[in-house]
Image: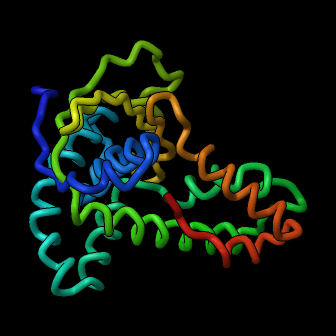
Amino acid sequence: MNYSRRLILPVGTLFIRFAALTRSLLISLSLMFVCTTPTAAQNITAEEAVDQYISALLMTMEEIKPLYETDREAYFSGVENALAEFVDFREVARGVMAKYGQGPNGASAEQLDRFAVVFRSSLVEFYGSALAEFGGVEYEFIKNTQESRNPERSSNVRMSILGDDGDRIEIQYTMFMNDDDIWKLRNLYVQGVNLRRQYYSRFDNLMNRNSFDIDRVIDLWQVEE
């Protein structure tokens, strides 16, 4: 398999607008908006699954990008559908809530479900708008030196991304196989920075500022640069 590819994604003014970490997260998240069909895990590794998702990006963005100017609702719906194929938002939301989603005083199942929906919508709105202006990156997979204890059910996939500004960024996808035997994304690391932990810091800050009212925090939640 050839692991060196060229993606023609929209880049331009984004790198001016965002700080370095946010820019890195945007590049990596752009590689998540990629698939129109779930990838069955039978006879396929996590790395191959990620490669399939990313390979579908050109077709997906080519189809929906014109809708950004003519039909925003349809555009964001397309982005959301593509992202949902790759990401298990409930698992990500659970990780973002962290301690606030556990124990007798933690979030209820309904609150977790509601936060997963709000979190997904905020990501789609913020990064979907950015993707409409995104440019291009090159990527290649890196050999994973840390073997998973159960590689058939969970695995870390490492990738090196070269942006159009010449910077090289390492991404690590934390993948797991769901109950339908489909590889899904649970977490993402950018240059060693834990994405879920970054969003947890925001959630924790909102909890402290709003008397630890989970419902209030969910109402206030939005992804910000």
**Residue in front for this viewpoint, 193 or 1:** 193
Number of numbered discs visible in the structure rendering: 0
Picture quarter with the N terminus: top left
Above or below 199: residue 218: below
Where is residue 181 drawn, in percent x and y? 39, 48
Above or below 119: residue 20: above
Where is residue 179 drawn, in percent x and y? 47, 52
Left or right position of 9 against 202: left
Left or right position of 82 against 203: left
Where is residue 22 drawn, in percent x and y? 44, 48
Q: Which residue is drawn at 76% across and 77% down?
A: 216
Left or right position of 12 against 77: left
Q: Which residue is drawn at 27% across and 32% down?
A: 161
For the question of whether residue 177 can be seen, the reply is no
For the question of whether residue 220 can be seen, the reply is yes
Where is residue 152 drawn, in percent x and y? 42, 31
Q: Residue 156 lies in what quarter of the image?
A: top left
Q: Residue 220 lies in what quarter of the image?
A: bottom right
Above or below 44: residue 106: below
Q: Residue at x 13, y 44 (%)?
A: 7
Q: Residue at x 56, y 69 (%)?
A: 222
